[in-house]
Amino acid sequence: MSLGGGVRLVATDLDGTLLDDRLTVSPRTRAALDAVRAAGIVVVPVTARQPRGTRMIAEQGGFTEWALCGNGAQCVHLGTGEVMFEAYVDVAVQRAVAEALADRVPGVLFVSVREAGEVFVAQDGYAAIADFEDHKRDPATMGGHALAAVVAEPSLKFVVRHAERTPDELVAEVRALGLGGFAVTHSGAPFIEILAEGVNKAWGVAQLCERFGIDRSEVLAFGDAPNDAELLAWAGRGIAMANAHPEARDAADETTLSNAEDGVAIVLEQLLEPAGSGTAAAG
């Protein structure tokens, strides 16, 4: 069995990429993941989810070790709970963004995700426009806080949402503020995410690779959303799903079939085929 043409680490997004439209790992995809791991290749989920949401599908995917959560802001061991690293948005930065954006876009709401992704401090009114799948939390448990409380402590992820404005529109509004000290993206969910400056999925995978002694040229990455774009561009081989947002597709080297068609599995199966016997990914 080949070791995948020099690939030593597979970094894969979950929602819209590895998971099918039922938010499950198909039997074919699980078999491909197991075969890659058996060949000695590290497989790491790289997701906007917090650890609690990642653990919900960890058993299906056979994920027992390191995961990158919160768009790369946090690296956590799914088995032991050990945190390898975390990156927080400063209080002053999130306060400045919240105040300026609330003036610019009336009705915008905020959440601070803190302390290993387990503390969720939502602004009054946020729970009313949320559902469980948004954050893998029951909205009835979210509570509600004044904005001053939401921005009072640093955040692993500072969530911004509006009942009527799309994520793409909100990203544009945040960028139009002309403020610095943070990164902004979205994952296809109905909100956007503000991270510490310079933090994204590529940054997180780079930190992990440094510790493992893996070069970026040895990384195979999969994704479908704007928050995957930096990783797809950074990796030695970046593959977008057929269902990908244009920003992710433009950043990738190639595309594969959609998440509903086992697009990740197809590439991983080809990765382990004897040289010359495989076929290229779609696109």
Image: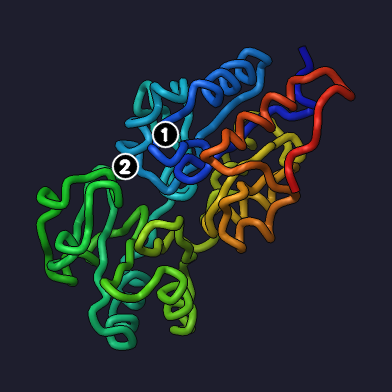
Does residue 128 appear left or right of residue 60 in this picture?
A: left
Is residue 30 visible from the viewing direction of this image? yes
Q: Do the residues labelled 2 and 1 touch (CB within 8 Å)?
A: yes
Q: In which quarter of the image is residue 58?
A: top left
Return the residue at label 2: 116
Q: Residue at x 78, y 20 (%)?
A: 273
Instruction: Judge by depth and name the residue closer to the eye, 125 or 99.
Output: 125
Residue 159 at x, y = what percent?
33, 62
Identify the element where label 2 is drawn: loop
Residue at the far front: name it: 261
Percent position of residue 259, x then y: 54, 41
Where, quadrant-wise, is the N terminus in this rendering?
A: top right
The quarter of the displayed image where residue 195 is located: bottom left
Which residue, as the protein is rendered here, is positioned at the far right?
Answer: 276
Which dot marks residue 76? 1
Mark count: 2
Q: What residue type is labelled 2?
A: Ala
Give me the residue at 66% from left, 30% from top.
266
Q: Distance between the residues labelled 2 and 1?
A: 8 Å
Q: Is residue 262 above or below residue 4?
A: below
Q: Is mark 1 on a helix, strand or loop?
A: strand
